[in-house]
Image (cartoon, rainbow, N blue to C red):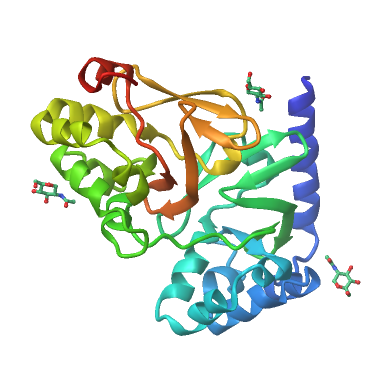
Amino acid sequence: MTLMSAFHLAAFVVSLACLSMAMKTPTQVLTELNATKFLDIVQKANDQRILGGNTDDLYTVLVPSDAAFNKLSSAEQNNLENIPGLLQDVLGVHVIPGQLFSWDFVNGRVIVTDNGHFVRVYEPNQDSTYLNSAKVVRWDVEAKGVVFIVIDTVLDAPEGTIYEVLRGPDFGLNIFADMVDKAQMNNTLHQTAGPYTVFVPSQTAWDNLPDTIKDEFSRNIGLLRSVVQYHIHRGSLHVKSLDRNGTLNTFYGNHLIHVSVTNDIKLNRVAGLEEVDIDCDNGVIHIIDHFLFPSTAGSVIGKK
Ligand SMILES: *[C@@H]1O[C@H](CO)[C@@H](O)[C@H](O)[C@H]1NC(C)=O
Ligand SMILES: *[C@@H]1O[C@H](CO)[C@@H](O)[C@H](O)[C@H]1NC(C)=O
Ligand SMILES: *[C@@H]1O[C@H](CO)[C@@H](O)[C@H](O)[C@H]1NC(C)=O
């Protein structure tokens, strides 16, 4: 028997042992975990997926610790209480249909939450696991109908698809959204299929672009399309997983983005990250301070 299957068997035996004992209710367990803020929210929302203790309808619930809630700004905490629907959205991101245990969270796995958002598993080393931007602090706490996993950060409730966030008022990304339209990538970035990671040049990146290149973009739709596609990676990558030197595939053929990590993270040695981990329904956006150009653009723009 391999080590792994011995581990699985042991875990299986342990979970059988737990089943045979009377299970505590979700409320009891959340109280014992000192997850008072989460319990408070769940009770306000009267969320029966979590509180119901229904063993025919099992859920895995990511529980932000009280410390996680304390990291939210007071504006964010107010929003949670006052913006209609936000609480439900935020809860939904933390609820996964079915029963999952620590061994199900393998590096790179993308898990779809109960309201259709993506949670990506990232294990930088043996001792830590991240779910999107949140670090797991406690695994596999069972209650009736639920498995709880405690995390150190409240996960974001996305405000729409990547395309909707590009078009939205929050980040001022309309120039890139217009480019996405012209490159006919708007439908792709609006689909619930995915997930994608989009590196979106900021307004400053646009302002710093030479006029010759802006002119070329308006003349040469092929160039524009290749550049837009070159900013899109297939798969969801939060900044925690951009922690080593390497390359990322893109929508533009075999053209890769180079990631270099020294004191900070640079893409193709020029572009730094301005704002990271903007979660969307179909992936994640990072705002960057320079445009990225594939090598094929070299002849057109003079130089990479
Ligand atoms: C919950 O808080 C109590 C009192 O501070 C403490 O004794 C206990 O160890 C805590 N439990 C967990 C799971 O952190
Ligand atoms: C994408 O652009 C096309 C052509 O302009 C348009 O018909 C379509 O509705 C757009 N899709 C989205 C999601 O905006
Ligand atoms: C990435 O490469 C640079 C230059 O070779 C090196 O200084 C740096 O330590 C590397 N970063 C990591 C995280 O290995």
256 relative to 202, above or below: above
Name the side, left or right, on which 143 lies relative to 264.
right
* Residue 286 seen in the figure: yes
Taking depth in this image into account, of 261 and 210 the one nearest to the observer is 210
Count the numbered circles shown: 0
**Residue 48 at x, y percent in the picture:** 53, 74
**Residue 83 at x, y percent in the picture:** 42, 80
84 relative to 236, above or below: below
Residue at image coords 51%, 83%: 81
167 relative to 25, above or below: above
Residue at image coords 34%, 34%: 231
**Ligand 1 rendered quadrant:** bottom right
User: Looking at the figure, which quarter contains the C terminus?
Assistant: top left
Residue at image coords 67%, 47%: 101
Where on the picture, by quarter, is residue 4? top right
Where on the picture, by quarter, is residue 52? bottom right
**Residue 19 at x, y percent in the picture:** 74, 56
218 relative to 178, above or below: above
Where on the picture, by quarter, is residue 37? bottom right
Residue at image coords 55%, 61%: 94
**Residue 280 at x, y percent in the picture:** 39, 53
User: Looking at the figure, which quarter contains the N terminus?
Assistant: top right
* Residue 112 seen in the figure: no
